[in-house]
């Protein structure tokens, strides 16, 4: 069978799907990194709070208490910002996943289209062969009956 008229479109769709899969994978990596940074910030904040609480039982001055509260506030702010980054990364991943799924559907549609085209071509070829065989048999019969009539 000659190259399908859809082969180029199918190839382009596959390339777009691969690019979408790559973007999705990068988005997954960024989300993982953002979550890891969030966990690190939360762990550091909890550790800092625990150390200060332990030290505070022995008594701390007002200045130290204010510094603690100020720094803890900055850590809470950093955790909040990182939570926002995790959410943005998650939304980006969901968007990239949807894009990949759309491209995958397009590839599958071209695969199905080419499969149907191949089936139609095979059916057409079978009919052509059957017609040729019928004509051959008809000629054979005609030649055989014409030869007997002499």
Image (spheres, rainbow, N blue to C red):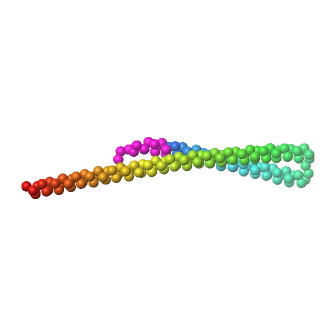
Q: How many marks?
A: 0
Asked if residue 4 is among those painted magenta in the image, a careful observer would answer yes
Q: Nearer the viewer, residue 145 or 26?
A: 145
Say if residue 21 shows up in the picture. no
In this picture, residue 121 sits left or right of residue 72:
left
Residue at 38% across / 52% down in the picture? 119
Asked if residue 12 is among those painted magenta in the image, a careful observer would answer yes
Residue at 13% across / 56% down in the picture? 145
Residue found at the far left of this picture: 150
Say if residue 103 shows up in the picture. yes
Which region is colored magenta? 1-14
Q: Position of residue 69 (x, y in %)?
A: 85, 46
Quarter the C terminus occupies: bottom left
Q: Position of residue 32 (x, y in %)?
A: 65, 49
Q: Nearer the viewer, residue 18 or 119?
A: 119
Residue at 67% across / 45% down in the picture? 88
Q: Nearer the viewer, residue 131 or 28?
A: 131
Q: Position of residue 130 (x, y in %)?
A: 27, 54
In this picture, residue 43 sits left or right of residue 131:
right
In this picture, residue 78 sits left or right of residue 146:
right
Residue at 63% across / 45% down in the picture? 92
In this picture, residue 47 sits left or right of residue 148:
right
């Amino acid at each position: 069978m000659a190259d399908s008229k859809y082969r180029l479109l199918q190839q382009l769709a596959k390339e777009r799907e691969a690019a979408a899969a790559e973007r999705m994978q990068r988005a997954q990596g960024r989300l993982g990194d953002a979550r890891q940074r969030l966990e690190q910030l939360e762990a550091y904040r909890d550790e800092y709070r625990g150390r200060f609480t332990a030290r505070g039982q022995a008594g701390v001055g007002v200045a130290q208490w204010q510094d603690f509260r100020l720094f803890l506030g900055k850590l809470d702010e950093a955790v909040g910002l990182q939570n926002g980054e995790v959410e943005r990364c998650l939304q980006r991943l969901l968007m990239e996943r949807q894009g990949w799924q759309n491209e995958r559907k397009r590839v599958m549609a071209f695969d199905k289209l080419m499969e149907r085209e191949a089936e139609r071509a095979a059916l057409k070829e079978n009919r052509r062969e059957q017609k040729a065989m019928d004509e051959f048999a008809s000629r054979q019969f005609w030649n055989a009956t014409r030869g007997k009539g002499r």
